[in-house]
Image: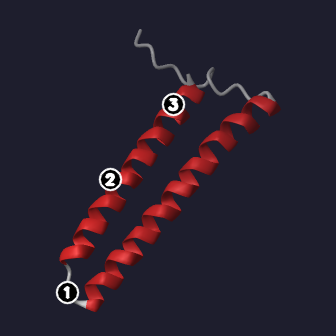
Amino acid sequence: MISGFFQLTTTVGLIGLVVVWQGNSLSEIFTLSPDQREKIKRHKRTALKSTLTLVLLGPLYTVAGSTMGLPLATCIDLVPI
């Protein structure tokens, strides 16, 4: 269940990156000021860094946890009583 959660959040993060990247690219077309263009480029870089962190750490945590035998699923109970 935990690895499914990481797969879901990674997928949503990648979709979010595409949406933000396309939105910023569209904004950049209609922006005239160089200062605003630089802010948009900084925002794109920040979004890329965040997505790379999500894509690298999610699977890494899942693999490292299963390799070390950590009881990841036993500490979380998502079924109501």
Q: Are the residues tagged 3 and 2 within 8 Å (C-beta)?
A: no
Label at residue 23: none
Q: Which residue is mark 2?
A: 19
Tag of residue 5: 3
Bin the neighbour count of mark 1 within 10 Å (Cα to Cα): few under 14, some 14-19, many 20 and up.
few
User: How busy is the neighbourhood of tag 3: few (under 14 within 10 Å), some, or many (20 plus)?
Assistant: few
Which residue is at the front of the view, 36 or 5?
Answer: 36
Kindly report which numbered mark, 1 or 3, lies closer to the viewer in this rendering: 1
| Vertical side of 31 occupied by 53: above or below | above
User: From mark 2 to mark 1, how far is it between C-alphas?
Assistant: 22 Å
Q: Earlier in the sequence, mark 2 or mark 1?
A: 2
Whole-angstrom CA distance, mark 1 to mark 3, is 42 Å
What residue lies at 81% left-to-right and 33% top-to-bottom? 68
Q: Quadrant of the C terminus?
A: top left
Q: In percent of the image, x 70 and y 25: which residue is there?
A: 71
Residue 35, percent from left and from top: 29, 90
Query: For mark 2, does the 10 Å Cα neighbourhood hold few (<14), some (14 to 19), or many (20 or more) residues?
Result: few
Image location (x, y in percent) of residue 49:
52, 64
- At label 3, which amino acid type do we have? Phe
Q: Within the image, what quadrant is residue 76 found in?
A: top right
**Disc 1 residue type?**
Leu
- 18, above or below 74, in the image: below
Q: Are marks 1 and 3 in contact (CB under 8 Å)?
A: no
Type of amino acid under label 2: Val
Is 2 rendered above or below residue 59? above
Q: Which residue is mark 1?
A: 32
Where disc 3 sits, the SS reads: helix
Spatial distance from mark 3 to mark 2, Cα to Cα? 21 Å
Residue at left 80%, top 32%? 67
Element marked by disc 2: helix
